[in-house]
Image: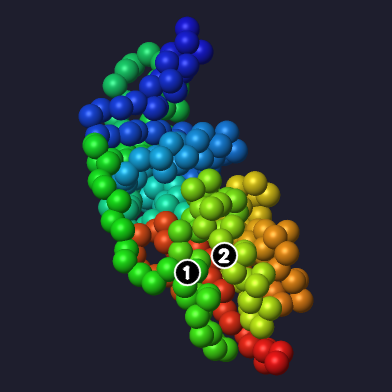
Amino acid sequence: MREILIFFLLLSNFMWSQNEIKHVVYFDTDQFDVSDIEHNRLLLFIQDIQKQDVQRIDIYGFCDDRGSDSYNLLLSQQRANAIKSIFSEHEIDNSLISNVDGKGEVLLKTIDTEDANIIRGLNRKVEVIAVVYIPPRPEIIKEEQSTESTLKGNLKVGDKVILENILFKTGYSQILPESIETLEKIAKILKEREDVYFTIQGHVCCTQSARDAVDRKTKKRNLSVARAKYIYYYLAGKGVNKKRMKYVGMRRKFPLGGEAKFDRRVEILITYIASKKQ
């Protein structure tokens, strides 16, 4: 009976309510560290909401009824903060997170001892509520000089060229399928521009301070480096001389201040312009 109850409660963690997607993370007694199982379940939820047009995210921490009021309030806040940290590490824009609150204890509503233990376990939790736009908002298109025309033009040392429309899958170094055609064009131009030497700079979004994000494929905190390295080897595979290129990870030192997806980017820093042969 106990296993059946827990199964259906866990099954109900993912549920739609008009424009809300909800998830619950469970904790051990007196703990705010997220277990491996709960961490993996949370990553699946993050992947799910990253497919949506998210308006805001609310994170609420709770405790069981044991412990003093002050202790429970602190522990519930620590649990909520722990979940927010995981969101940041996996490139969820902090500006989307509206509330990160510890609510203290959830009162016990049973006198049966066995049931009490189950209910206390289900009260040690964080509830995450993602509010999404239904239907999704139309894309906002920025009118800027294209990357291709910039790379074909007059470049000088110190110029930075953002590789527009080279967008990455959240948490990974691989580019999105719709970016392949653009990267093909950029590779062709850079192969022909034998006078240009450059450093490929990878960036991430949404992490706290200037930290790097976690690469979900390797589990290492070096996602900005991995993105730059991906572009480096892609260009090399298309015939761009490796001697003209370097790559480096910039972590989250230079956010653009707009939509989070544009911070998951790669830029080219021009480091040397060789004299053209007569």
Who is closer to the viewer here, 159 or 182? 182
Q: Mark 2 touching mark 1, by CB under 8 A?
A: yes
Specify few, some or many for label 2: CA neighbours under 10 Å numbering under 14, 14-19, or 20 or more: some
> What's the amino acid at mark 2?
Ile
Asked if 99 appears above or below 22 in the picture, the reply is: below
Residue under the point 35% across and 40% down: 52
Quadrant housing the C terminus: bottom right
- The numbered dot on residue 147 is 1
Residue 23 percent location from the top left of the image: 39, 33
Residue 205 visible within the image: no
Asked if 114 appears above or below 251 in the picture, the reply is: above
Residue 209 percent location from the top left of the image: 47, 69
Residue 221 percent location from the top left of the image: 62, 58
Mark 1 residue element: helix
Residue 16 percent location from the top left of the image: 30, 27
Label 2 sits on residue: 186
Residue under the point 50% across and 80% down: 153
Give the residue at the far front of this rendering: 278
Residue under the point 47% across and 10% down: 4
- C-alpha distance separating marks 2 and 1: 8 Å
Q: Left or right? Give the position of 49 relative to 244.
A: left
